[in-house]
Amino acid sequence: MLTPDYPVTLTDLYQLTMAAGYHVHNHQQKATFELYVRRLPAHRSFLIAAGLEQALTYLEQLHFTPAQLDYLRQLPAFAQVPETFFSHLAQLRFTGDVWAPPEGTVIFPHEPLLRITAPLIEAQLVETLLLSLVNYQTLVASKAARVWLACQRGERPVGFTDFGTRRAHGPEAGLLASRAAYIGGAIGTANVEAGLRYGIPVFGTAAHAWIMAHDSEAEAFANFQSLFPQHTTLLLDTYDTLEGARQVTRLPVPPQGVRLDSGDFLTLSHEVRQILDEGGCAQTQIVVSGDMNEHKITELLAAGAPIDLFGVGTELVTSLDAPSLGGVYKLVEQRHPDGRCDYKLKLSASKAGYPGAKQVYRHYDAHGQLVSDTLALADEAPISGAEPLLQAVMVNGQRTLPQLPLAELRARTLTQLQSLPLAYQGLEPELPSPVVVSPRLQELLRTLSVMPAAPL
Amino acid sequence: MLTPDYPVTLTDLYQLTMAAGYHVHNHQQKATFELYVRRLPAHRSFLIAAGLEQALTYLEQLHFTPAQLDYLRQLPAFAQVPETFFSHLAQLRFTGDVWAPPEGTVIFPHEPLLRITAPLIEAQLVETLLLSLVNYQTLVASKAARVWLACQRGERPVGFTDFGTRRAHGPEAGLLASRAAYIGGAIGTANVEAGLRYGIPVFGTAAHAWIMAHDSEAEAFANFQSLFPQHTTLLLDTYDTLEGARQVTRLPVPPQGVRLDSGDFLTLSHEVRQILDEGGCAQTQIVVSGDMNEHKITELLAAGAPIDLFGVGTELVTSLDAPSLGGVYKLVEQRHPDGRCDYKLKLSASKAGYPGAKQVYRHYDAHGQLVSDTLALADEAPISGAEPLLQAVMVNGQRTLPQLPLAELRARTLTQLQSLPLAYQGLEPELPSPVVVSPRLQELLRTLSVMPAAPL
């Protein structure tokens, strides 16, 4: 199987060399790291947080096996590392605290997607895997939210479903994409394992091979419908889309849907709709797939294309116009056994961040519209009337957040999207991030640095 | 763990509805499907085949579990599907034949990356997972080959290593990317699990957090070097890169390397080189990381930047300038129990392909340079003096290709890259694909279609 028992060695070598260094030099401090993005990917006005569930499962089961320790012992780099380090790893579990916004939360730059406080070695070791899980699912959920917004822009809202497994970056990426796409607003997925594992509704049509495996398209259509009377969506473009639509009208009963997979979808959807309507198939829905994205969906719906459902694949699961999320995982403070607290701030010019363990307070107006966020220190007094976004989800290595049904996370996303001012809902960013820095955090910055952080 | 025991349900729902249809309507034919790309991704002149090893492992272990069958039985779409289908699935194993070019082979459009011949249900079911495995690894190996070519363009060849796990599309993508990047020319990876599992050399430096966890940079450098005397690469840019370089020269012995991770790398690499040389660290290597790609490497090396090793992350593991490979898996022929053979050809305008099970013959000149490829039918007489690219790698469900050491696959890639004419080695395509269609395949096309296939 794939997730969730990720090997602890699925990390960068330097996490382990640094861990050895912390062990040998007896670093006893508790460290706080925050996972956040410094800036949004191209074309994005916001992110949708996703990946927390897998991150917590990973942290809960973190451990070293004897085979992993043997591998490390024989690496030339570790030749001088004392055996006490490997004994320490053999006992190591994740014992820290995690704070995070729930999956499905709208997030802006510098707002933590995860905040980890743990003994330095533990907090450092998990960086690579946490980034990998949260970067990717957040990327896909954010793309899905854009597609969802596009699907609301016609005369009536329509749905979209994830068709992307085959173009995802490997099998697990396809599975995680199905999950993140659903959280971000998809109505379901074609990925059966995502249905089995996560309870996501599964959708399917038929492929060109089904048509081609028969002597005629008519026979292929009839055979499919006889077996799936209530669940037949017939693919029209194997030979000729309009001829395919005419074949559909000759079936004994109208099928649930037809799918267009190539050609000029605006013209074809009108022509196919007319053939179906005139042929007694007025209830048959039109599904469109083939390099769909939020721009094409917006255009088709604005032009009045009679499309009922979009299948979105490559663009969704690779976030094609912005295929990576630059999430980083940075040390922001340390607390030493003697009670001393260090705030940490990297000073290299292009990469400056904000020091200290943080909380985010979200302000809404009387209509429930998001007005602004305040990036504050976690130990500041709560801001009255504002919503604190980060919750305690793991305490002393034990998760305190129950596993939430995905439908609940999806509903959270849709509520959050509806709370966004229209300027954040468009296809291109119009407004700067609505994040302001609390006076106390500004003051801390001043005391720590001569160099200002990058503006929010 | 992650690979290789992928669940059979990690597939699109329509593979299973079609399978039910083939079962109920008693399709007994053997089908041949080919996995290929219709056109190259943006900026690419060729592909490097990768992912075959995982594909074969997946096919060997393919089976349904009772829990998977129970999930399918309760899906509303399957309400009319007879129990004999589920009994058939419970017994199903992959019993087909697979032909493929070895991993590390240069490949052009329409040349099969896999050719699968099996009972129709088996061949159809595996489409999604095979595409997902081969699309992604081929994408990354092809990107890595471009980076490798860029690394040869300076006064002396330099190396590059994979630093991308944290930005890959999930943990498994990071692992598969390490493998594909190594096949494509990387000298190693930072991913420890890739070292453990695949035997890839692992490389590591230290992170900003290591520096920041100490009271001073000098202490951080000294502590790291004392533990890893032969394996120390120190990160210079936490506070000030040039000051960091001066600190390095004050260490008791010169470290193996230093790493630059931000700033103007051309200027900084010269300045750091000078500080190191004047400070008695002439043997200390300069490693550069931070949004590296084949273009930036070409420019830096052409400008004479004294860089010894590149760490390449996001750009490599997401193939950022071309983040998806449009591999397709198409039915090309069927053989019926009565011996009749159908050649299959999809006719929709933009997606036409070539019918029939195929072989590719590669022609070299006397200097070992690739001249052209011939796309031929598999049952044509072999072309004398040309190299057939596809080999039998699985027969009747049993793999016949042994698992090859990755270093051998990597060596194959480098040999293949050196056989490419210079016009295919550049950063942008200059020449059309060198693939020509054999006379017999042309003749078959004519007999089957009124519509010509897309030109090669």
Image (cartoon, coloured by chain):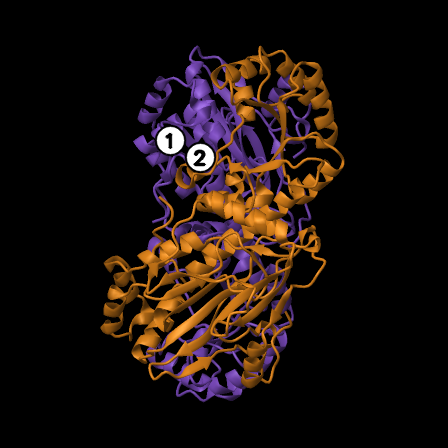
Chain colours: A orange, B purple
The percent position of residue A196, horizontal first and vertical second, equals 40, 37
Real-space Cα separation, disc 2 to disc 1, in angstroms: 9 Å
Considering only vertical position in the picture, is B193 above or below B270? Answer: above
* Both labels 2 and 1 in a single chain: no
Residue that carries the numbered disc 1 in the rendered image: B71
Instruction: Tell me the SS state at disc 2.
Output: helix
Which quadrant of the figure contains the C terminus of chain B?
Answer: top right
Tag 2, which chain? A
What's the residue at 44%, 29% (across, down)?
B125
Near mark 1 (Cα within 10 A), the count class, few <14, some 14-19 or many ≥20, is: some
Q: Is residue A340 left or right of residue B320?
A: left
Tag 1, which chain? B
The answer to which image quadrant residue A384 occupies is bottom right
Residue that carries the numbered disc 2 in the rendered image: A192
Considering only vertical position in the picture, is A367 above or below B378? Answer: below
Q: Is residue A240 left or right of residue A207?
A: right
Q: Residues at badges 2 and 1 in contact (C-beta under 8 Å)? A: yes
Name which residue type carries label 2. Val
